[in-house]
Amino acid sequence: MENYNFMIDQLLDQWENKIQETTDLFVAIGEQFAMEPVAPGKNRVIYLLGHLIVASDCFLAALEPDARRYPEYEALFLTPQHHANEYPAYELLLQQWVSINEVLSAYLRQLNPADWKSKHNYISETDFIFEPKRNKFNVLLNRNAHLFHHAGQLALIRTQ
């Protein structure tokens, strides 16, 4: 059990470090470049910020029923971006990004090993019987990969 806790702690540390690095990138990029695509023909910075807020919001909901904080963003940030979309203020989104991840991190840190092995809210009891690896730990693995993917996209933007 001790090795299992160590592995969970390592993955949580990695996730929290990438959240901080991504936050630092969003701050460094700033509102001045929010509407810029990260590369020609790619997502805008503000879209990625909103998309990652929704991803963290859905992550929290996978762990805790009725925990969604920003369901109103789903239509805007889970569908492909459109040039005519109107977005909330960059600074507001940045505050919400920090807030949702503080809540999520606190929640994740209080889970015990049995919690991590339990089903998440996006799988039925019946399906979980046949697919027990679709648990809360698996959601963390997938959300971590998703975060790394989009943080890599942010690294493409040129702000000079």
Image (spheres, rainbow, N blue to C red):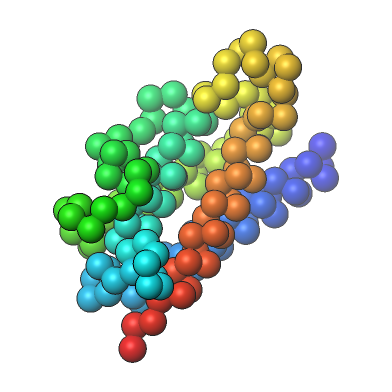
Identify which residue is drawn at 44% across, 69% down.
Answer: 154
Image quadrant for the C terminus? bottom left
Find residue 90 and report its image quarter.
Answer: bottom left
Asked whether 1 or 47 is in front, the reply is 47
Identify which residue is drawn at 36% across, 76% down.
Answer: 28
Task: Judge left or right: residue 129 versus residue 48.
Answer: right
The answer to whether one can see residue 33 in this image is yes
Task: Give x and y (percent) for residue 106.
Answer: 49, 44
Find residue 110 and report its image quarter.
Answer: top right
- Position of residue 32 relative to residue 60, above or below, is below
The answer to whether one can see residue 99 in this image is no
Identify which residue is drawn at 43% across, 37% down.
Answer: 58
Task: Judge left or right: residue 25 versus residue 113.
Answer: left
Task: Give x and y (percent) for residue 77.
Answer: 33, 47
Identify which residue is drawn at 66% across, 29% down.
Answer: 134
Task: Give x and y (percent) for residue 33.
Answer: 27, 74
Task: Judge left or right: residue 45 versus residue 138.
Answer: left
Tell which residue pokes out farthest to the bottom in this image. 160
How many numbered tags mark residues here? 0
Tell which residue pokes out farthest to the front in this image. 41
Task: Give x and y (percent) for residue 10.
Answer: 70, 54
- Position of residue 80 relative to residue 25, above or below, is above
- Position of residue 19 relative to residue 64, above or below, is below
Asked whether 44 or 72 is in front, the reply is 44
Task: Judge left or right: residue 103 versus residue 121.
Answer: left
Image quadrant for the N terminus? top right
